[in-house]
């Protein structure tokens, strides 16, 4: 129970403090991606993962990352300790970031582990190129 509360507090603090507009869950993210014709970024985290926290608190707070994400993507964070990972996606290591089309199909290579902003931007741009948006 305490683990679930900590996970919820972490996700809420990230969504309240970041300029990225996070979807509340995967289903909402898919609907929003279809409505806005955007790609979807899904990051799987775990409650006690320090690299997950670093990704959420540093990389996703970078103004360049925020600008690219808000313009082109719907972003959702899924905590594997309290929520099932959507079908077809597997995260043995966390953080694991998936780049999906508006129907939930992978469009680019997944980013496994922590990535600094410059590297994460490369993954975002790769997803946009593979989806022919760049």
Image (cartoon, helix red, strand yellow):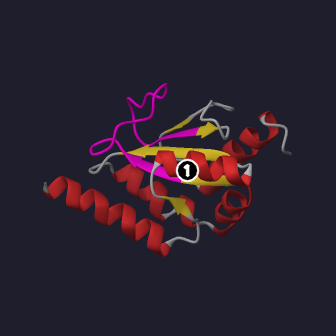
The picture places residue 92, in percent across and down from the top left corner, at 38, 29
Taking the image as drawn, is residue 125 in sight? Answer: yes
Label 1 Cα crowd, 10 Å radius (few <14 / some 14-19 / many 20+): many
Q: Is 84 on the left or on the right of 96, as rendered? A: left
The picture places residue 105, in percent across and down from the top left corner, at 62, 30
- State whether residue 37 is above or below residue 104: below
Q: State which quadrant residue 84 falls in.
A: top left
Which element type, helix, strand or loop, lies under badge 1?
Answer: helix
Quadrant of the drawing holding the N terminus:
bottom left
Q: Is 103 on the left or on the right of 81, as rendered? A: right
Q: Is 28 on the left or on the right of 39, as rendered? A: left
Given residues 12 and 92, the one toward you in this image is: 12
Q: Residue at x 63, y 37 (%)?
A: 100
Instruction: Point out the residue furthest to the top here.
Output: 88
- Main SS, magenta residues: loop
Instruction: Look at the image and give the residue range highlighted in magenta.
Output: 76-98
User: What residue did someone put label 1 on?
Assistant: 29
């Amino acid at each position: 129970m305490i683990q679930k509360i900590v996970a919820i507090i972490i996700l809420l603090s990230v969504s309240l403090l970041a300029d990225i507009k996070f979807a509340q869950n995967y289903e909402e993210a898919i609907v929003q991606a279809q409505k806005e014709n955007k790609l979807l970024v899904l990051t799987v985290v775990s409650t006690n993962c320090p690299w997950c926290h670093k990704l959420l608190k540093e990389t996703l707070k970078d103004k360049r990352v925020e600008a690219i994400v808000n313009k082109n993507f719907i972003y959702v964070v899924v905590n594997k300790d309290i929520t099932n990972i959507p079908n077809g996606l597997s995260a043995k290591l966390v953080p694991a970031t998936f780049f999906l089309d508006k129907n939930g199909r992978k469009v680019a290579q997944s980013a496994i582990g922590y990535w600094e902003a410059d590297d994460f931007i490369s993954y975002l741009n790769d997803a946009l190129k593979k989806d022919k948006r760049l």
